[in-house]
Image: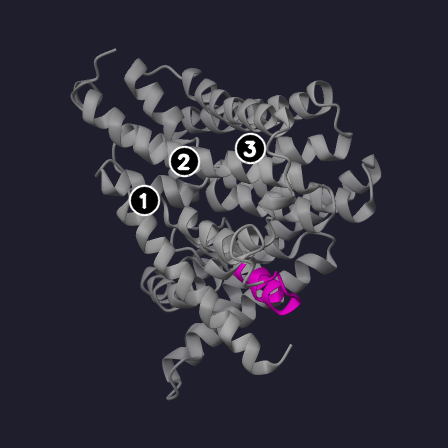
Amino acid sequence: MEVHTFFLYLLIILLTARIFAELAVRLQAPSVIGELLAGVVLGPSLLGWLEPLQAIKLMAEIGIILLLFEVGLDTDIRRLVRTGGKSVTVAIVGFLLPMLLGFALGYWVFGLSLLVSLFIGGTLTATSIGITVRVLTDLRRQHSVEGQVVLGAAVLDDVLGVIVLALLYEFSVGGGISLVNTGKVLVFVAAFFVLAPVAARMISLIIRRFDAVSEIPGLLPTTIVSLVLFFAWLADVMGAPELLGGFAAGLALSRRFFLPFGVALRTDAKFADRIEAQMKPIVHLFTPIFFVYVGLSLNLREIDWASPFIWIFSLSLFAAAIVGKLLGAFMIREPWPLRWVIGIAMIPRGEVGLIFVELGRVSGIFDQEIHAGLVIVIALTTLLSPLAMKWFYACYGERLHTGVR
């Protein structure tokens, strides 16, 4: 491809993603739906203007790593500790049930292979903390009882999801499931989660000192992006997916992260705020490219829409995705309206689910029909949750305030 043609492609992707994201938000839908739809419209499914080229794929992979960095940066480990058993129950049950239901449907109902079924189950475990936080903030319920339980559960969901993603990555690279490889990945992931945050925190102290004396603007985003990319490379060297490095770097630099290693490693809240403020424009530049790339990779024309498989497959997984998360919330002792709203808030798969699906597609695990069906499920859950939460608060908000059972 000519360089000027690539520039034109990139211009179209960025502007179209922004326009569709703005339209989605105005229609009360998450922006990620608009960016995904932009890729569908520009790609082979509709207009056929753009293809998922290698250069766009590389930029999309940077977007994934930076997206997981932002997820880690927004992760509040202390919130999980404060909400205690309720968040843990919601997270673990809401993590295991969708995975088991997704695997069972894939393996026993649709007769898919073991690896494909595991990827399907892994995809259904995700919860998009970004979408959940935005809806709760819009409704001014982020500091409520249910808001704290949901956000605490979403934190644990993120950590468990990244571990499952690392395992699935190993299975896809290794061409199958091996107990030896599984044990190796778990050891590497555990070591990475212990050592990487400590290293990142120490490096951040050096960055902070240089930032205080530097007379050239832009030192902070340059060094932080370099740190994220270094940790992405390190994660790959240790046998884990690159995006695990982005998550670990974000977690370590979070203003709410804490380590039992002494006062010297405590977080400087103001410095963490500056990191977040200066990194957000870069993250928001690259992550839409990833979502558009997912849409470009989806060729809806190759799907046999007359076949009952795609409809039965999508609807059954959609039901499993909803039921699995709702049952996790039903396990805690709270008034029923509170349980319902917690369960609904855990439903959206959003960008986290799309990362699972993209890994399955790139690895050759998913064919076009499975890939399309899962993207449909993620889109439906992402749309359903914000709309259902707003309706639920409009109808039952008073009962939630008074604690009526």
Judged from this view, the residue extending furthest toward the bottom is: 215
Give me the residue at 42% from left, 38% from top.
Answer: 382
Pointer 2 residue: 152
Task: Find the magenta span and give its range.
Answer: 51-63
Q: CA distance from mark 1 to mark 3?
A: 20 Å
Q: Is residue 6 above or below residue 331?
A: below
Quadrant of the image occupied by residue 178: top right
Dots 1 and 2: beta carbons under 8 Å?
no
Q: CA distance from mark 3 to mark 2?
A: 16 Å
> The C terminus lies in which quarter of the figure?
top left
Pointer 3 residue: 125
- What element does badge 3 sit on? loop
Give the amino acid type for the residue marked by disc 3 in the picture. Answer: Thr
Residue 296, how many percent across, how many down?
Answer: 56, 55
Q: How many marks?
A: 3
Give me the residue at 77% from left, 30% from top.
Answer: 113
